[in-house]
Image: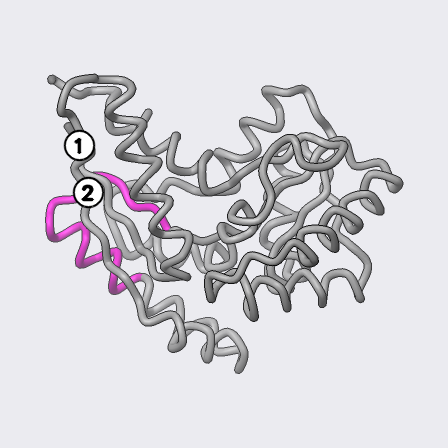
Amino acid sequence: MKTIGLIGGLSWESTAYYYKYINEGVKDRLGGLHSAKCLLYSFDFAEIVNLQQTGRWQEAAALLAEAAVKLEQSGCDVILICTNTMHTVAEQVQRAIRIPLLHIIDVTADEVKRKSLRKVGLLGTQYTMEQPFYLERLEKLGIEAIVPEAADRKRVHEIIFHELCRGELKPSSKAEYLQIIDRLHARGAEGIILGCTEIPLLLQDGDGPLPLFDTTYLHSSAAVEYVLQTANV
């Protein structure tokens, strides 16, 4: 079985679900006592958040690239960045390694297209919603994405960093997210990408009027599919 390299701790709250989903996926496919072969490089999230807040994205890119190189040198066959926001530096990370980086936007787009949706809402950090890397990559893959208005983007971001990344799940915040989703629905969204790996801690598919795309689960499932393609077990 191939080995998965996880760049995590961004935050650890959602990284724990990567480990859970990947191992459950392998167990479901292979049965018995099978589990995934994986290595985790876990950051001190506060250090990365400081770089984000001060706009030092190239320094953050260098740190993630260094982590990816260490995972490759340790025998990993594929790399996952266990967060949506830091895919803004995915190209720099991929250039640093010879093994593939499994891109979270690509696997999410595959599921959106599988459900025959063309226009979706995107929730995530302000970096994810306001920087071009996410929307432009979706557009290249044939998907139109819209983001909340400025005040709603600010509130989505605040809930992520002040609550979800700290393990706080508040019904009031879930209600706020559902109101924001309703406003995206009114603007034509046919589904919602939960474009932050912490948001699925608060929202699950079936909450609200639209299908929700859990990027943590989709990314993890794609990793399982990748490593089992040539598994000899």
Instruction: For mark 1, give the secondary structure.
Output: loop
User: Mark 2 or mark 1, which is nearer to you?
Assistant: 2
Q: How many marks?
A: 2
Left or right relative to 16: residue 131: right
In the displayed orientation, state which residue is furthest to the front.
171
Name which residue type carries label 1. Lys
Left or right relative to 220: residue 210: right
Q: Is residue 6 above or below residue 21?
A: below
At 35% across and 56% down in the image, what residue appears?
A: 93
Q: Quadrant of residue 100?
A: top left
Q: Which mark is residue 38?
A: 2
**Dot 1 alpha-carbon crowd within 10 angstroms: few under 14, some 14 to 19, many 20 or more:** many
Q: Which residue is mark 1?
A: 2
Q: Nearer the viewer, residue 25 or 65?
A: 25
Name which residue type carries label 2. Cys
At 65% across and 54% down in the image, what residue appears?
A: 171
Residue 94 location in percent, x, y? 34, 51
Q: Is the Cβ of the residue at disc 2 closer than 8 Å to that at disc 1?
A: no
Q: Is residue 39 above or below residue 112?
A: below
**Dot 2 alpha-carbon crowd within 10 angstroms: few under 14, some 14 to 19, many 20 or more:** some
In the displayed orientation, state which residue is furthest to the right.
186
Task: Quarter of the image for the N terminus: give it.
Answer: top left
Residue 182 location in percent, x, y? 82, 43
Q: Which residues are magenta?
A: 65-81
